[in-house]
Amino acid sequence: MKEDERLFRLIKEAGSRYRHPVISARFEKFKDFKVTWNRTGKERSYKVSDYMSDSPDAALYEFLDTLISRNSGNKKGYGPEYLDWVSSDGFVLSKRPVYLERSRNITMSTTGTRRDIGESLDRLLGSGLLVDTDIDNSFFTWTAMPGFTKVGSCNAMFRVVTVSSSLDSDDVPERVLDFVTYHESLHLRRGYRPGRRAHDLAFRESERAFPGWEECEKYLLKMRREQREKMKRRGQSPVPAGV
Ligand SMILES: [Zn+2]
């Protein structure tokens, strides 16, 4: 394919800068934005996420240059052409539907059976904890399956927030849902930051602006613990925790 030829040409060029021989490269329909490679002796074959297949040469080259540099033991950061391209509204708007289509375990809706993520966002905006620009060009959805260990996640590249349907219940305080929605929205506020820590000190400070955050965290920990015990009793192995 033409796109694969362009990819191979650019990655070979980046590879030659770092004496890093690349023998083949092609775009792959990964769900997540990622790159994989195989090594044969000193030579490598790359598979690059097809979300980059129609990117401008400069953005693609910068991305590949950082990739190869890192694979050669350097610590090169991501360049502005690449970051501007993947952070542009156009990129998000054209690639997000593909990402959502490839995602399983989402309902594609903010309306749950008992709770509404949209109402949660309204409360957060109304109280001033969030502002409109935080959630600009974003997509919120419930998970289809009620995960208990991971109650929320944010894909900052495609600006997609997923909230576990375990929180779509009258038993869970509305405040806890708001806290999880707030936490994930803070990732949207910060945007796509590849190679940088998500939950750094500045993030934790913003998170603590939420009134009653401690009680909410305690509630979520208790929920996970109870679920772990329930699964143990049923003989299932627990899933690693995380927000
Ligand atoms: Zn987080």
Image (cartoon, rainbow, N blue to C red):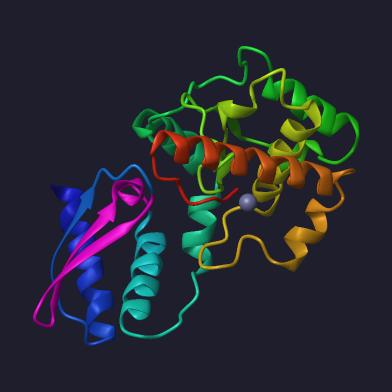
Q: Which residues are magenta?
A: 33-55
Name which quarter of the figure residue 142 lies in. top right
On screen, residue 43 above or below 216? below
Q: Is 230 left, or right, of 120 in this rendering?
A: left
**Rendering coords of residue 89 (x, y %):** 56, 41
Count of all numbered marks drawn on residues in the image:
0
**Rendering coords of residue 147 (x, y %):** 51, 34
Q: Is 121 left, or right, of 21 in this rendering?
A: right
Q: Is 105 left, or right, of 142 in this rendering?
A: left
Nearest to the observer: residue 208 or residue 159 = 208
Q: Furthest-front residue in view?
A: 233
**Rendering coords of residue 222 (x, y %):** 68, 42
Residue 56 falls inside the magenta stretch: no
Nearest to the observer: residue 148 or residue 11 = 148
Residue 36 falls inside the magenta stretch: yes
**Rendering coords of residue 204 (x, y %):** 76, 59
Q: Residue at x 21, y 65 (%)?
A: 37
On screen, residue 175 above or below 90? above
Name which quarter of the figure residue 178 lies in. top right
Name which quarter of the figure residue 71 lies in. bottom left
